[in-house]
């Protein structure tokens, strides 16, 4: 229809140049066939608004039609009974452990007037004020509803020009591993890794309850809480039901994106969760409480199947907290939990990408030529690999459309954008801006990546890629590893990042994080290493060490490896061409470096050739080797699996310094 609307003869502008006068004409009946003018089907405004919204259905992660649905077979229950059961379950989750049985919960937004259900019974003597008030439960809201909640009630929430929800995570813009506590209790204490190097800092059961009560009281004092009931693990037989109770729409949308979204039927039959998170992140822990060393505490209790978050609103804490839990539960079932990205080629060849934060798991597993299985957390079972999550969590700093188009395009309606800076009027995000933090992030459902493999499962891996971002710039961009070297580097979990972002050149700091995820593992690293060795051997996987860090010198002199080169290297691993390449062995680290990789300059392949100062190169190489050796000392007394030959070989597979050093 034209702008002046003359087609249906209803009105026209009298003079297009002068003042626009509108003259109306009666439309000839036979011409007016435009059914968009049909009368509204409401008698008044309230009715009209009621018509606007259709009966809700839960938003779910797309399932392959052939995927069996999990959960118990459905039994007939009236809608009313089902709702009642759901509310009882949520009320039980939120119950104080010392007072009344559970808070009075009602479903729905408190801002929409609705009278609370009557007949709560006569007040009991042990009842507190908190039992008299209602807590509104916003249960598995959709992204649109969560956007509205965030924008109305959470400062710092904005819609960006591409439709993402920009949020602020508050004072904490990254994880707080030093504030993580694990309850030492009889069901798990003998299995867990405690002591030096372990991420599991102990807490007793009583103190956990103190923090749990603090979180529960805080959540119940609010007018409303968000509850997400979702799944972890695409391997349906080993699926875990999780419930996340939080105070912010940001947290609810983040977990909606990051966990697997149940279908409406799965949600109806959800029942009791296998694990519950109480996220009271806006509320601090009490520093007078035993074991508390800051106002932040992230507490995991495997016996109670609960996690409490106090004093940090960084949403990544929830996803990585659940990952820790999976690092306990999965190995018990013979499934190796992996801090890795994972993708699959057209021929069904699967690759794993291990690496610490910022080394390239998300960037490199998101590949236009391959199916994305997941970017961060997987399980490797007898059936192959499966993603634990339903979404990705990409770093956004310096994100460009040219270099990472899939991630760029995933930042749209539904995506949570943490701590980014945007132009205030058009809301175009400036991904270069580090004003809030360098750790800017986007959390989006995995199906926002066009070539995501749904369901997110695949066969046994063919290639295992260990990523290191070596800011010393001495590790070759790619080398093929022997099984013993694979174990050595897997247990070492090396990367080197730059300490600060303040001006001036900073020394790279080496980080060693066992299994490329020491912050999340729960058992001794050698347990995971033995499982990896066993699975790799049985399924014939080849391992590679890929340096996505510096080239041509250390940080300050050299430059970050071109993403273009890393992608060429990764392609050559995927297509099998690198397996048949010729290799040269490097000094000290004894790494097998291919003499050629298509599309990568040969001097880049051999760091000693790309450094102008050869003496400095040799010194830096030796320095890094020394750091590796020092880190590995604690593992020298451990046995990996039952194969003591492998244990000896692993020790010998690390860097060897000449005695004169
Ligand atoms: N050669 C490279 N390989 C991989 N990533 C690179 C490279 N050069 C720069 N980068 C950047 O490094 C970051 C890697 O982060 P990411 O993939 O999110 O790591 P992880 O998922 O392992 O935490 C991205 O911002 C990416 O753009
Ligand atoms: C969310 C995280 O994952 P990664 O940086 O490995 O993507 C994290 O380590 O906080
Ligand atoms: Ca040698
Ligand atoms: Mn990542």
Image: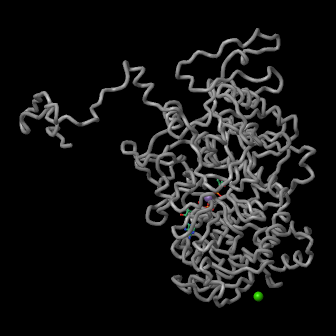
Asked whether residue 295 is in view, the answer is no
Q: How is the image coloured?
A: one colour
In percent of width and height, residue 473 lies at 62, 75
Asked whether residue 85 is in view, the answer is yes
In percent of width and height, residue 305 lies at 80, 41
Quarter the N terminus occupies: top left
In the image, 93 versus 68, the foreground residue is 68
Residue under the image location 85 percent in, 65 percent down: 526
The correct choice, above or below, for 583 with respect to 438 in the image is below
In the image, 222 versus 238, the foreground residue is 238
Residue under the image location 56 percent in, 60 percent down: 452
The correct choice, above or below, for 658 with respect to 294 in the image is below
In the image, 290 versus 72, the foreground residue is 72
Quadrant of ligand 4 in image? bottom right
Quarter the C terminus occupies: bottom right
Disc count in the image?
Answer: 0
In percent of width and height, residue 488 lies at 79, 73
Quick check: 277 left or right of 303? left
In percent of width and height, residue 392 lies at 59, 55
Residue farthest along the front direction in this orientation: 30
Q: Quadrant of residue 206?
A: top right
In the image, 234 versus 424, the foreground residue is 234
Q: Quadrant of residue 243?
A: top right
The correct choice, above or below, for 660 with respect to 284 in the image is below
Quick check: 634 left or right of 60? right
Q: Quadrant of residue 567?
A: bottom right
Quick check: 562 left or right of 41? right
């Amino acid at each position: 229809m034209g702008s002046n609307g003359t087609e249906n003869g209803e009105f026209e502008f009298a003079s297009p140049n002068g003042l626009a006068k509108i003259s109306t004409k009666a439309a000839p009946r036979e011409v007016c066939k435009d059914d968009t003018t049909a009368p509204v089907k409401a008698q008044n405004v309230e009715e009209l608004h009621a018509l606007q919204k259709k009966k809700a259905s839960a938003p779910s992660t797309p399932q392959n039609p052939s995927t069996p649905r999990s959960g118990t077979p459905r039994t007939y229950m009236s809608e009313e009974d089902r709702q009642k059961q759901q509310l009882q379950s949520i009320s039980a989750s939120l119950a104080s452990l010392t007072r009344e049985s559970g808070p009075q919960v009602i479903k729905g937004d408190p801002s929409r007037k609705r009278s609370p259900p009557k007949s709560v019974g006569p007040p009991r003597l042990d009842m507190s004020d908190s039992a008299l008030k209602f807590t509104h439960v916003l249960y598995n809201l959709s992204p649109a509803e969560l956007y509205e909640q965030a924008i109305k009630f959470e400062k710092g929430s904005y819609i960006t020009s591409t439709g993402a929800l920009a949020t602020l995570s508050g004072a904490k813009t990254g994880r707080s591993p030093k504030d993580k506590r694990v309850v030492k209790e009889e069901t798990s204490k003998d299995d867990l890794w405690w002591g030096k190097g372990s991420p599991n800092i102990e807490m007793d059961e009583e103190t956990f309850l103190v923090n749990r009560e603090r979180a529960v009281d805080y959540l119940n004092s609010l007018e409303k809480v968000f509850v997400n009931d979702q799944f972890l693990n695409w391997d349906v037989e080993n699926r875990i039901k999780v419930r996340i109770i939080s105070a912010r729409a940001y947290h609810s949308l983040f977990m909606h994106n990051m966990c697997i979204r149940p279908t409406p039927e799965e949600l109806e039959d959800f029942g009791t969760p296998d694990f519950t998170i109480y996220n009271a992140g806006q509320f601090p822990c009490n520093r007078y409480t035993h074991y508390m060393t800051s106002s932040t505490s992230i507490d995991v209790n495997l016996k109670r199947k609960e996690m409490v978050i106090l004093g940090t609103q960084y949403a990544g804490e929830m996803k990585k907290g659940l990952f820790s839990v999976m690092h306990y539960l999965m190995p018990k079932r013979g499934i190796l939990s992996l801090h890795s990205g994972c993708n699959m080629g057209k021929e069904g060849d699967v690759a794993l990408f291990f690496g610490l934060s910022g080394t390239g798991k998300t960037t490199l597993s998101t590949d236009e030529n391959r199916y994305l299985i997941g970017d961060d957390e997987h399980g490797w079972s007898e059936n192959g690999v499966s993603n634990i999550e339903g979404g990705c969590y990409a770093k956004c700093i310096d994100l460009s459309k040219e270099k990472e188009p899939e991630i760029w395009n995933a930042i749209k309606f539904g995506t949570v954008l943490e701590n980014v800076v945007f132009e205030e009027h058009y809301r175009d995000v400036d991904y270069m801006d580090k004003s809030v933090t360098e750790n800017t992030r986007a959390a989006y459902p995995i199906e926002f990546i066009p070539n995501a493999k749904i369901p997110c499962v695949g066969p046994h891996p063919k290639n295992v890629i260990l990523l290191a971002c070596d800011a010393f710039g001495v590790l070759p961009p790619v080398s093929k590893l022997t099984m013993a070297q694979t174990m050595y580097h897997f247990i070492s979990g090396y990367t080197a990042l730059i300490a600060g972002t303040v001006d001036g050149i900073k020394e790279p700091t080496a980080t060693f994080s066992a299994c490329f995820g020491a912050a999340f593992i729960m058992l001794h690293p050698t347990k995971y290493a033995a499982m990896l060795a066993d699975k790799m051997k049985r399924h014939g996987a080849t391992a590679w060490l890929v340096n996505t860090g510096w080239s041509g010198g250390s940080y300050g002199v050299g430059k970050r490896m071109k993403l273009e080169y890393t992608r060429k290297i990764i392609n050559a691993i995927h297509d099998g061409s690198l397996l048949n390449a010729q290799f040269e062995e490097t000094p000290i680290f004894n790494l097998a470096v291919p003499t050629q990789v298509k599309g990568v300059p040969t001097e880049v392949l051999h760091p000693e050739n790309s450094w102008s100062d050869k003496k400095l190169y040799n010194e830096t190489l030796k320095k890094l080797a020394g750091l590796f050796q020092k880190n590995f000392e604690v593992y020298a007394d451990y046995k990996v699996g039952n194969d003591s030959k492998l244990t000896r070989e692993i020790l010998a597979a690390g860097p060897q310094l000449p005695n004169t050093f």
